[in-house]
Image: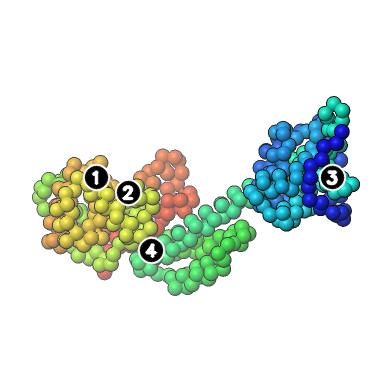
Amino acid sequence: MQTHITTTPFGRRPMTLAMMASQVAANAMPEGASVQKWHVFKSIREAKDLIGATDRSLAILNALLSFHRDTELSAEGELVVWPSNEQLMARSNGMPATTLRRHLAVLVDCGLIIRRDSPNGKRFARKGRGGQIEQAYGFDLSPIVARAGEFAELAETVQTEKRAYKTARERLTLLRRDIVKMIDAGIEEGVPGNWGKMTRTYQAIIGRLPRTAPRQLLEDICEDLDLLWIEIRDVLESFTKTQNPDANESHSGRHIQNSNPDSISESESGLGDQEEAGGSAAENDNLHSLPKRELPLGIVLDACGNWRELAKDGEIRNWRDFLAAAEVARPMLGVSPSAWREACEALGERQAAITLAAIYQRADQINSAGGYLRSLTDRARDGKFSAWPMVMALLRAKLDAEKAAAQTRGAPPDDGDKREGRLEVSEALLRSLRRPKS
């Protein structure tokens, strides 16, 4: 008994080395071998570039597998399927006949299937008297069973490469962010150094980065950026060490005093004439000697890390995002529209937002954020308030907390990977701001 399925003849095809290799692999398939066809197909799909397959050819392979009724492909079972071209095209999302033939050839060349041609080039199955298939002509799926282990290893290789590429991209992003931030900090604070040369070096390294870069190139660029990162860090650390430790320590005490909740409560109550920067006459004089330039955004975010949680996507990329977060924080802190309007008029919108961010950072220590902001607004009108001391006090407290945590763990305060916290930059800024005026 013979069952025919009409197909378009493919004609005689020459035997290629790929076909011979596939047949050798299929013949070497151990007895009793079986695999889950969709598990193997997943591995083939992940490793398609290494195998040499295409998306179109895998769509055809998916269709061929669907014609095998069982989910398991076994060496003991029938592994030849014989769908017509029309059936294959229908299950391959209406693929044209010419495209179908081309990508069937790709599957054969990749060693994923074997052609089992009949004498007349058509695909069909010959059944015995009991209805069992005695002979089938079509596409043999046995290479999928024989090479299942190979495909799994190739898929793992691809996944390993993807993880390595992702790691290299993340490292590149961190290095670029840290280097730009440290260069900006060095220039802003007047740290002695050839910042122009360092900037040009950084731009030259990044200029080698194409739109789509292979992993090896990413790692090479990261190595060069890492050397530049170390050079810039050493310049900032050397500048920090040249400062007078005794003067810095006494000056730091006044900022630490400012972070005391009791000090804040006095400001909120409007008791006395104690100034925000510390309350002493020396501190009042220091207000007039503060830098006139704007606080860098990165430094403000270092000090007011909680501010990021108010951003729409948890990330503040520019001052526009920073000011937008202020509109979220104001009602949360109970600051009235009139108090906020007066603060913006006295301080300017950006400085008012920085002040609000500092208040938000220490919200658990402030009884009335609205009253506190009004008090600071009044001081600003008299020229007795600046956002700089507030930000510096928060940075100082953050640095002290990091050092205390390191000592608790038994590690030296200055050890560890400084790229994580990047507090070495904040320390340099703090010390440079505190050096005595000549």
Tag shown at residue 116: 3
Tell whether label 1 touches label 2 (CB within 8 Å).
Answer: yes
The three-letter amino acid code for the residue at tag 2 is: Leu
Quarter holding residue 74: top right
Q: Picture coordinates of residue 273 (x, y %)?
A: 11, 53
- The image shows residue 434 at horizontal and vertical percentages of 29, 60
Dot 1: element: helix
Labels 3 and 2 touching (C-beta < 8 A): no
Image quarter where the C terminus lies is bottom left
Relative height, residue 13 to residue 210 (above, below): above
Which residue in the structure is indicated by mark 4? 185
Q: Name the residue under label 2.
A: 310
CA gap, disc 3 to disc 4?
71 Å
- Residue neighbourhood size for the residue with mark 4, other residues' Cα within 10 Å, grouped as few (<14), some (14–19), many (≥20): many
Side of 65 relative to 28 (left or right): left
Q: Disc 4 residue type? A: Ala
**Mark closer to the observer (4, 2):** 2
Q: Which colour scheme is used?
A: rainbow
Which amino acid, mark 3? Arg
At 32% across and 48% down in the image, what residue appears?
A: 310
